[in-house]
């Protein structure tokens, strides 16, 4: 199979966020947000390191007050990835965040309204080479603007876009074009309509997500439905899967989504059959053990940009074919299974040794992939 399926990509400007590039044809990046008190620098930096280890490219940190904004300096110095400051209501917090060396600002047009405040922030950001995300949420649109549009999916989408464009125009008047835009709603249809509308108005990169998606699995399904649809249309330069859960789960989900669409390389794509009455082994236990034991290796390959396809199949119907198509495959049968590597049969294994044998083959394939990447 090809390394990447050629889904269309909307042409956008490139925006530099510290060492990271968003848009301009760069790989779609995965974001998350810390959920610790920002004033607790130790806890926040620990969470950022966990996110980075999972493959997070950019982390957003809330600055709800002066103490939090001033803590950003220490967080930026300790962070292994680019840091964005999340600012609402008070433009002075944005100015403090810039002084603390953040790589990006997120401003919400719904609660940062005065043009003179936006100009002050934009001028300082421009002087420091810091981009701004104009981040609109459906729940915080200005009431006067909301009243202009009907309360329908289409009306809400138009309100989101108009809110974003109001901020964008102010920035453009200052010749500020290092802009990223997001237009998030908590329902998939409004979200998709808003991003489609925005994509036709400006060439700025779009940060895509369904806000307040909720707990897994509902939040994962809503996010995959909305983000996946937009990415399939070529819309989106950076994504966040917003879950009421550990932020590491957001990053894992974002990576899996990009891998499913073949828009990012790296990591292990694990194919597993749903099982049925034809399965003669304890397949549920088998696949759970395999997944757990490959977790760290998956992250190593992800960080290196190395991709592997592994397949664990439960019977002789689709098993041999799927196993042969993978880099490493297993076709299970009665009391054991057959191992494949690169489409070739390796050997038969018993049910007792099946997990160890399969994981060992994946590890060997991973080492070969990593060695080839370094050469």
Image: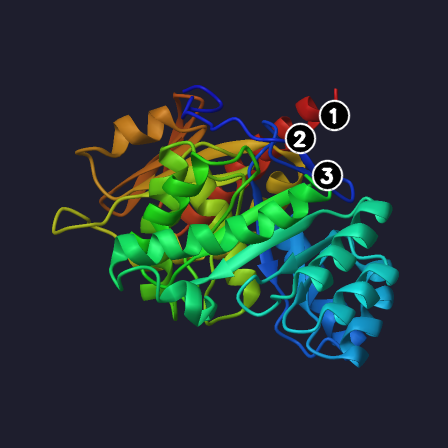
| Color scheme of the displayed model | rainbow
Q: Name the residue under label 2.
A: 370
The quadrant in which the C terminus is found is: top right
Relative to residue 169, is residue 138 depicted above or below? Answer: below
Please give the name of the residue rendered at 45% of the width and 66% of the height, measured from the top-left corner.
141
Gap between marks 3 and 2, in whole Å? 44 Å
Q: Name the residue under label 3.
A: 175
- Report the number of discs: 3
Q: Earlier in the sequence, mark 3 or mark 2?
A: 3
Taking the image as shown, residue 11 lies to the left or right of residue 313, namely: right
The image quadrant of residue 187 is bottom left
In this view, the mark in front (3 or 1): 3
Which percent across, then down, holds residue 183?
Answer: 46, 53
Please give the name of the residue rendered at 39% of the width and 33% of the height, measured from the top-left corner.
329
Please give the name of the residue rendered at 77% of the width and 76% of the height, measured from the top-left corner.
68
Query: Circle 2 — which element?
Result: helix
Relative to residue 40, is residue 72 depicted above or below? Answer: above
Residue 209 shows up from this direction = no
What mark, if any, has residue 374 been given in the picture?
1
């Amino acid at each position: 199979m090809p390394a990447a399926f050629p889904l269309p990509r909307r042409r956008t400007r490139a925006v530099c966020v510290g060492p990271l590039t968003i848009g301009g044809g760069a790989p779609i990046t995965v974001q998350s947000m810390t959920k610790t008190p920002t004033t607790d620098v130790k806890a926040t930096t620990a969470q950022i390191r966990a996110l980075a280890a999972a493959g997070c490219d950019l982390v957003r940190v809330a600055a709800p007050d002066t103490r939090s904004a001033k803590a950003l300096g220490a967080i930026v110095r300790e962070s292994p990835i680019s840091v964005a400051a999340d600012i609402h209501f008070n433009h002075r917090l944005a100015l403090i965040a810039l002084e603390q060396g953040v790589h990006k600002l997120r401003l919400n047009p719904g609660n940062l309204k005065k043009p003179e405040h936006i100009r002050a922030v934009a001028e300082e950001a421009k002087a420091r080479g810091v981009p701004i995300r104009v981040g609109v949420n459906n729940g915080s649109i200005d009431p006067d603007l909301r009243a202009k549009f009907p309360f329908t999916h289409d009306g809400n989408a138009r309100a989101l876009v108009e809110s974003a464009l109001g901020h964008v125009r102010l920035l453009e008047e200052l010749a500020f074009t290092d802009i990223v835009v997001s237009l998030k709603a908590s329902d998939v249809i409004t979200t998709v309509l808003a991003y489609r509308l925005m994509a036709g108005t400006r060439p700025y990169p779009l940060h895509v997500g369904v806000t307040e998606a909720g707990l897994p699995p509902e939040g994962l399904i809503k996010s995959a439905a909305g983000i996946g649809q937009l990415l399939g249309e070529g819309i989106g330069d950076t994504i966040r899967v917003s879950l009421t859960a550990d932020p590491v789960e957001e990053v894992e989900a974002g990576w899996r989504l990009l891998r499913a669409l073949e828009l990012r390389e790296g990591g292990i794509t694990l194919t597993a059959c749903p099982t049925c009455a034809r399965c003669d082994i304890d397949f549920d236990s088998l696949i759970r053990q395999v997944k757990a034991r490959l977790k760290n290796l998956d992250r190593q390959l992800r960080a290196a940009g190395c991709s592997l396809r592994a397949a664990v199949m439960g019977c002789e119907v689709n098993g041999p074919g799927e196993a042969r198509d993978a880099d490493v495959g297993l076709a299970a049968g009665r009391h054991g299974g057959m191992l494949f590597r690169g489409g070739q049969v390796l050997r038969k294994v018993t049910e007792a040794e099946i997990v160890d044998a399969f994981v060992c083959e994946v590890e060997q394939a991973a080492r070969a992939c990593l060695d080839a990447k370094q050469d």
